[in-house]
Image (cartoon, grey):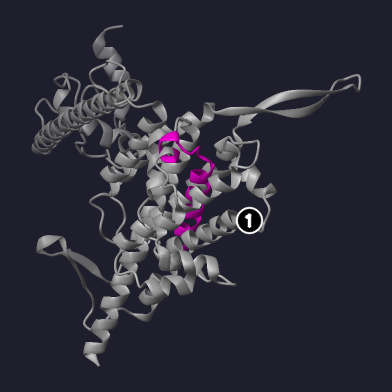
């Protein structure tokens, strides 16, 4: 059958062409008599194909018109512009993705180089000559924790959240240093029941007892300190640095609100408790460290000569020794004087302990604590050593910002136990941060009180 007859078959009176009879390459929404663009098929495909009509093939002879209508031209031009805009946006997005990938690669490269440097210093014992004259691993790790604290918190002198990059550095580097503790283990007995009911005792490894107890506590204190700093995100005051490094606080004209003052007092109390807990852990770790031979050799021959006659008579002749009253009488004027007194009291304490142990067969300095428990409680040297220890404790409580004594510094310098080095340095930096937060909050409350008094 020819094409003309085929055409006649579908040309009945009243017949309206359906969209399927059109060339599929031309899907422009052109209205014709008797054909509505809101029909089901045209509505389904109209939006999709109108955007790509600029790329359609020419309309064939069987279409409704041999030339595109003005509406078709406008749709075609709009689709081309739309495609061009989308193309530019896609290119821009791809360029941004490529730039981000390059930035990530550069950050990863810098981080890898930093880790290499720290690992090399750890192995070399901070001796860059490679001659093997560096310090031991324990001291290197202790220095690493101290230096990291100075890098992250050294410039943070305000009550505000830690910057994200600083917080990330602190967490990443501390996780790396603390991961060493995962491999410091001890073996403990554990009961195991076999299938036949036989009970066996096997040895299982777990973190060493001092690490097992103290490290989770230190991690918790660390997280709490970060929470304290984060709580000052929307504070009513701001801190401004003056020339010379001094700081001033800017408050509302009538001072802080009662809610802000309550919040500050609460965070101060939290930081103070964290400071006490960190200091207690640090003191316990230092107490467990071995006393270096160099310190023992430097002890004075006479505790009385080291302390002076005034303090010695007060400690020895008093029926009930009161360290607080003695410190009140001394009237220490500065932290430097307090630290000097602490060094002398500590040296005298170990001098008297050594003399108290001379009459015993066990003369090893590592056994001093065991020997003191067996000593005669009426021994003069023993009494003086106990009172010197009480005076030293009271002195540290009265001056919580007191620097490390000569013995503490000597212990850290000559310590070779890696686990103790990590716990000591970690607790020490947390203690310092907590103390600073307490001091900063006290400064804010003091200035707020001054502003409110001026308003009244």
Q: Is residue 246 left or right of residue 287?
A: left
**Residue sitting at x 57%, y 39%:** 210
Q: Which residue is mark 1?
A: 379
Residue 69, given in percent of the width and then of the height, sits at 10, 34
Label 1: few (<14), some (14–19) or many (≥20) C-alpha neighbours in 10 Å: few
Per the rendered image, the range of residues in magenta is 272-296
116, above or below 93, in the image: above
Q: Which quadrant of the rendered structure holds the N terminus?
A: top left
Judging depth in this view, the residue of 176 and 97 nearest the camera is 176
Q: Is residue 279 magenta?
A: yes
Residue 306, given in percent of the width and then of the height, sits at 40, 55
Where is residue 85, by image quadrant? top left
Q: Is label 1 in a helix, a strand or a loop?
A: loop
Judging depth in this view, the residue of 64 and 449 nearest the camera is 449
**Residue sitting at x 27%, y 17%:** 7
273, above or below 302, in the image: below
């Amino acid at each position: 059958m020819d094409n003309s007859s085929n055409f006649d078959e579908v040309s009945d009176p009243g017949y309206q062409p359906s969209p399927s009879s059109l060339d599929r390459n031309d899907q422009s929404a052109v209205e014709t008599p008797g054909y509505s663009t809101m029909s089901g098929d045209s509505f389904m495909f109209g939006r999709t194909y109108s955007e790509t009509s600029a790329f359609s093939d020419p309309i064939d002879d069987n279409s409704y018109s041999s030339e595109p209508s003005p509406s078709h031209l406008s749709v075609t031009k709009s689709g081309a512009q739309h495609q061009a805009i989308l193309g530019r946006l896609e290119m821009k997005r791809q360029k941004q993705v490529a730039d981000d990938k390059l930035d990530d690669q550069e950050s990863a490269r810098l981080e890898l180089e930093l880790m290499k440097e720290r690992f090399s210093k750890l192995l070399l014992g901070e001796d860059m000559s490679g001659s093997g004259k560096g310090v031991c691993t324990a001291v290197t790790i202790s220095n690493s924790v101290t230096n990291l604290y100075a890098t992250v918190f050294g410039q943070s002198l305000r009550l505000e959240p830690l910057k994200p990059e600083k917080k990330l550095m602190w967490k990443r580097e501390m996780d790396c240093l603390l991961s060493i503790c995962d491999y410091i283990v001890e073996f403990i007995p554990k009961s195991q029941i076999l299938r036949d009911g036989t009970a066996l005792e096997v040895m299982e490894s777990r973190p060493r007892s001092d690490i097992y107890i103290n490290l989770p506590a230190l991690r918790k204190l660390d997280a709490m300190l970060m929470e304290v700093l984060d709580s000052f995100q929307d504070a009513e005051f701001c801190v401004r640095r003056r020339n010379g490094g001094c700081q001033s606080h800017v408050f509302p004209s009538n001072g802080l609100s009662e809610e802000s003052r309550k919040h500050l007092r609460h965070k101060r109390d939290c930081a103070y408790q964290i400071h006490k807990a960190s200091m207690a852990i640090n003191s316990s770790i230092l107490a467990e460290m071995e006393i270096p031979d160099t310190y023992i050799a430097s002890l004075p021959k006479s505790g009385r000569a080291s302390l002076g006659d005034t303090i010695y008579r007060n400690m020895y002749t008093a029926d009930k020794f009161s360290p607080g009253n003695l410190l009140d009488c001394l009237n220490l004027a500065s932290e430097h004087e307090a630290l000097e007194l602490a060094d002398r009291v500590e040296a005298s304490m170990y001098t008297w302990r050594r003399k108290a142990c001379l009459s015993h067969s066990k003369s090893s300095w590592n056994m001093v604590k065991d020997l003191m428990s067996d000593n005669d409680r009426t021994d003069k040297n023993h009494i003086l050593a106990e009172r010197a220890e009480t005076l030293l404790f009271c002195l540290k409580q009265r001056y919580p910002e007191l620097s490390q004594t000569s013995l503490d510094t000597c212990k850290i310098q000559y310590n070779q136990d890696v686990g103790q080095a990590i716990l000591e340095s970690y607790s020490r930096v947390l203690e310092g941060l907590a103390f600073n937060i307490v001091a900063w909050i006290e400064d804010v409350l003091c200035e707020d009180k001054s502003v409110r008094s001026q308003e009244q």
